[in-house]
Structures are given as C-alpha cells and as structure tokens.
Amino acid sequence: MRKFESQPGFTVLAHKLALDPNTQATNRLHSHAGAARAAYNWAVAHVTAVWWQRKAEQSYGITGDRLTPWRSWSLPALRKAFNAAKRTDERFADWWQENSKEAYNTGLAHASAAFDNYAKSKSGRRKGARMGVPRFKPKRTARLSCRFTTGAIRIEPSGRHVTLPRIGTIRLHEDASRLRALADAGHLRILSATVRLERGRWFVALQVEQRHELTKVTRPDAAVGIDLGIKTLAVLAGSDGTLGKEPNPHHLERAQRQLRRASRVASRRQGPDRRTGQQGSKRWEKANRARNKIHHRVANLREDTLHKLTTRLASAYGTIVMEDLNVAGMGRNRRLARRIADASFSEIRRQLTYKTRRRGTRLIVADRWFPSSKTCSGCGAVKAKLPLSVRVFECDACPLVLDRDDNASRNLAALAARTTTSTGTGVAGDLDPTMVGSNPRGADHKTRTNRPRRKAGTGRAGGAIPSLRQGRKRETVNRTPDRAPHPGETVTDHPDRNAGIAETS
C-alpha cells in the first residue's frame, strides 16, 4: 500500500476537540465503538482458531500439507472474510447494518496491527517489550473508540458542530470556527476523525492536512537547559546565565486523601470477579465512578500544567536542551515510582519534540550518560561520584558551590553551543575536545565495587561509565550472572537517573 504523503508546504496534524453529544448521539457513539470491539474480537478468534486447530492436528501426527491452512491477518484478508461472515454469523446478523462500515474496519485494522506487532516482536524486528498473542477485549474494560476515514466528515459553518458518518451532527464543547475558516480558505483538509471515550467524556480527534505556518519564537538565538526533577519539576538555565524554576504541583499527591477515601468505599461494595465471572453491583459502579472522577481530574490538571510549560518554552527559545532520562529504570524505585509517574518526564519530552518541530526550532537531547550533575559548570571538572543524597554541588577544582539541579541545568544550556547537529542528538561525538579531557579521571572509572555474593561467583556484571568520547553502549539489567566477569569489567553506580541499569563494555 502506498504511503500517504502530504502536499508541499502542508503538515499532517491532529486537533482534539471535546464533544457535548445528546442522548441519541451518545447511543450511536457507544454502538459504533462496541461494533469496533466486536469486529476486533471476531478477527482474533478467526485467526487464532486455526492456530489451535493446527496444534491439535500435529498432536495427532498430521504434518505437512495435510494441516489446516494458515489464515492471513492482513487487513484486506480480514475485511473480505468478515464481509462474508457478517450476514450469517449470529453475532452480527441482526444488527451489523445499524453502524457504519468504518466501525468494523476500525476493529479489523487494530487486530491486523496487533498480529503484526506480535509477529515482529517474536522475530526480533520490533523494539521494546515483547508482545504477546492478541487477546479478546472485554466489554467492561475496553477503551471505546472508532475511526472514520470516509463519508461526511466536516465542521459545520457555525463552528460549534461536527458531522460524522451515520452518527450525524454533534455539538462541540468548544468553538472550532478557526478550523472552519482555514478549511474554507483551502489551508486545511480533514483526512480522518477518531472518536474516543476518555476520562468520562467523548472527544473527536480530527487528523488534518494543514498549511505549515512557522511562528517566530521570542528569542530565536537563546538556548535553555532543562533539568527535570521531582521536588522542582524543571530547573531552567538560560544561555545568558539566568536561572528559573518550575514548581512541581504534585497533583496526584494532593489527591491521595480523596483517593484513599473513595477506594475504601469502593472496596466495601460487591465488585466484579474475573475468576467467577461475577458482575459488579450497581453500588460498586457508582463508587467506582466517583473514584474515577478523581483520577480524571488529576490527569486533566497534569495535562494542563505540562502543555502550558512546554508551550511557553517552545515559543520562547530557539534551542532547548534536555536529558535522555531512563524513566523506566527510575520507575523501578519503589520509593519514588509514584512521584516520578506523576511528574511525567516522558510526556514533557514528547510535547517538546513536536512543538519545536512545528516552530522550526531545535531540540537537543543529551546522551543518557552525559554527567550533567557531576560536571562543574564553572571549570568543567567532573566528579567521580555524586550520590543522590548530596543536593549541593561543591567543585574540587574551583570554589564553585551550587545547587546540583542548577548546576545540571547550566551544563545542559552550555551543551547547545558545543552540539553541531540540529535535532535530537546524543552528545558523544559532538562535544568540544577540550571539554572531553577536562578531567583525566572523570566518570570513566569504577566508583564502587560490590561485595560478591556466595552463589554469584566473584562479582556482579557491569561496566565502566563511558567517557564522553565513547558512543552509546548497550543497556542490560544489572543482575547476577552465571559466570565470573571478564578481566576489566567493573560495577558502576548511577544514582542520578539510571536506577537498575548498568552498562557493559
């Protein structure tokens, strides 16, 4: 299938709008989302049934061409099989005509993508965690969504309504007159619309092809270094020497008292039981809605805070420098996991990535092993060890005494002048050679040696912290090996932001 390419001068964007549907529109939205879920479950059963059949035949000694043929999970094959079965299958025969064809196509497309991800993950062609076999989506916990790619999809001239196929005209919670004006002027074309139930209300995401308009930033020649943290969400150091701090609102921490109370009420109700198939009582559903309402408010407040922060930074500075944090490793710290999740470090980077691209500015992502906290922002000397409990940086080569977060943000801001690439770089090969040799000992020597365990041979697997000249290394979980380490292997400790991760040379 040919990949979609936007017109010259246009960019593919998405505008997410809140809906205020009436009772009739709400029922139709639920019907289309339920049809997508039913089509997904049908596709999973359609494909996996052959897998179990072939496994049973092999147990009987049947091999070769005598086995049941495989069923393709490509979208055209699933669509053809579903169209042939929907009129006779008792699960769809009575009601499939009530919904748009796009609802069933949405479920089939999601099933095809799920099987592709599973196959690629099993063969090692997909990055990230291993994907399992696609499973059925239960009715109570499945996320309700449906995507429309054909039919009448438009914003009405009033700017307060949107029209979707088979669902009709739905009122918008906000005014979309600006988008309608861009469409009338030929600067915007709607490609698809996705409706989804999120946090208790319906949203529509309009994927559009919009004319690219660069917005001039306030200070295009200035750079800012961002050091993310828990106590202070972000410490901002400008290239002109200014320092600023963005306080962490701790939305989840503030709501813990209400969440505990709501969870205690829900735990005393008769909830659902997956083992016995028992459904939750009406009183449990009411208590669960009250608890979810608190979670939804926390998520909305967090989203508003992060969008305001990233928009302010992307519209003010021409260059933004931040760290490539190992958020997954940090989340394994049981004492800080909840606060790290509440801070949403990965979401800040994601938003800055696309917002800087829209404005034509530069986002530099420092390498994960760049010692921003251990490096002196005054003379460039690198400490061999700086525990996380030490909150004040004291340089051993010069009289600089500074808060460690302020020192890290200044080092990140200075990194912009030494980085030659334009977007998203690791700093290993882009630094000034004089900076690399600032400390002959630095962070490329071992800082700690673990006492060997009784059943672990002579030590634990690990590696030395690479110098700034070295490239990025392969990451492995720091666990006890079955062999003794090779000569030259050492154990490292990265207390700042790489908990649970070590490097091997």
Image (cartoon, rainbow, N blue to C red):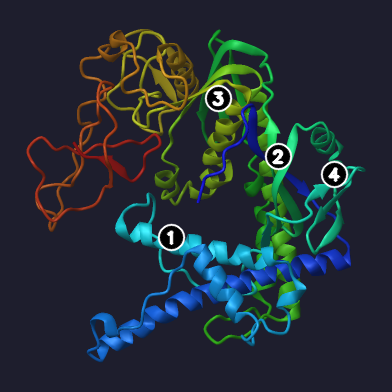
User: Mark 1 Cα within 10 Å, few/some/many (few <14, many 20+)?
Assistant: some
In the rendering, at what x and y percent does residue 144 appear? 67, 64
In the rendering, at what x and y percent does residue 74 appear? 47, 64
The Cα atoms of the two marked residues, 4 and 3, are separated by: 34 Å
Report which quarter residue 280 is drawn in.
bottom right
Q: Is residue 2 above or below residue 195?
A: above
Which numbered disc, 3 or 2, marks the residue that appears first in the sequence?
3
Residue depicted at x 68% and y 71%: 34
Amino acid at the residue labelled 2: Asp
Q: Nearer the viewer, mark 2 or mark 1?
A: 1
Furthest-right residue in this view: 158
The Cα atoms of the two marked residues, 4 and 2, are separated by: 16 Å
Residue depicted at x 61% and y 12%: 220
Labelled disc at residue 235 = 3
Amino acid at the residue labelled 1: Asp
Residue underneath mark 2: 304
User: Mark 4 Cα within 10 Å, few/some/many (few <14, many 20+)?
Assistant: few
Q: Nearer the viewer, mark 3 or mark 1?
A: 1
Is residue 202 something one can see in this rendering? yes
Q: Is residue 441 above or below residue 504?
A: above
The secondary structure type at the circle numbered 4 is loop
Residue underneath mark 1: 116
Residue underneath mark 4: 174
CB contact under 8 Å: marks 1 and 4: no
Which numbered disc, 3 or 1, marks the residue that appears first in the sequence?
1
Residue nearer the viewer, 78 or 20: 78
Q: Nearer the viewer, mark 1 or mark 4?
A: 1
Q: Is residue 327 above or below residue 364?
A: below
User: Mark 3 Cα within 10 Å, few/some/many (few <14, many 20+)?
Assistant: many
